[in-house]
Amino acid sequence: MRTNQLALILAIGFLIVSGCAGHRTITTDEAFWEISPAAPLPQHALTDQLPNLIVRINNVADLSSSYRNYVELFINGFKIEPESEITNIKRNYLYQLKLQPGIYEISGKYYASTGWKIKKFNLRTKEQVLVFPDKKTTLDITLCKDSWGGLKEKDVFFDVSYKDQPPKRKK
């Protein structure tokens, strides 16, 4: 009997304390970090968005010294396949992605067939890349090669730019 009375007293005490707690008050500056959406956006709202990250890698391969050279792109450790088919003479690579807003680590590898062996070069950004819901983030790089098709520098860097993106027009 005593345990039942103790449990009842504890339950009543909990209800009183939780009822008095009320709603937590935050400032408008805290709202972004403290308030989560009540539900995720519908799937069509996410798939209908315009690409918000564009990566262009130019001057990869050609019919002369850069034959068989290729590039790999990585975003947060995931290897990304280019949109169009890659051939031994694909000069420019284009990636148009729809990513969630956030900060990303983007890098690449350039593989140059320089005679008897393949040399690997790093394609990097100088800092992490920001992706916004209403802006287009563009990474551009044109590879400057030596006479063997390798890069003049071991590490080369993307040019990163941000541009406002108009809302997608309804059909």
Image: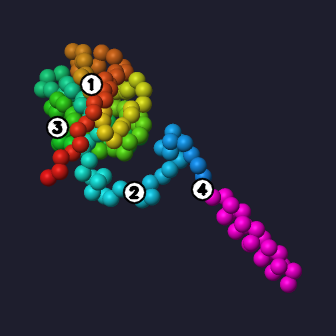
The residue singled out by tag 4 in the image is: 23
* In this view, the mark in front (3 or 4): 4
The CA span between labels 4 and 2 is 23 Å
> Mark 1 belongs to which amino acid?
Ile
The residue singled out by tag 2 in the image is: 40
Give the quadrant of residue 27: top right
> Mark 3 belongs to which amino acid?
Thr
Dot 2 falls on a residue whose secondary structure is loop
Q: Are marks 4 and 2 in contact (CB under 8 Å)?
A: no
* In this view, the mark in front (1 or 2): 2
> Chief secondary structure of the magenta span?
helix
Ranked by sequence position, the earlier of labels 1 and 4 is: 4
Farthest residue toward the bottom? 1
Magenta segment range?
1-22
* In this view, the mark in front (4 or 2): 4
Q: Residue 71, image x and y in percent?
A: 27, 33
Residue plotted at (32% across, 59% down): 42
Ranked by sequence position, the earlier of labels 1 and 3 is: 3
Q: Residue 151, image x and y in percent?
A: 29, 19
Residue 137 position (above or below residue 49): above
Number of labelled discs?
A: 4
The residue singled out by tag 3 in the image is: 87
Q: Please give left or right for residue 97 compared with residue 106 in the image.
A: left
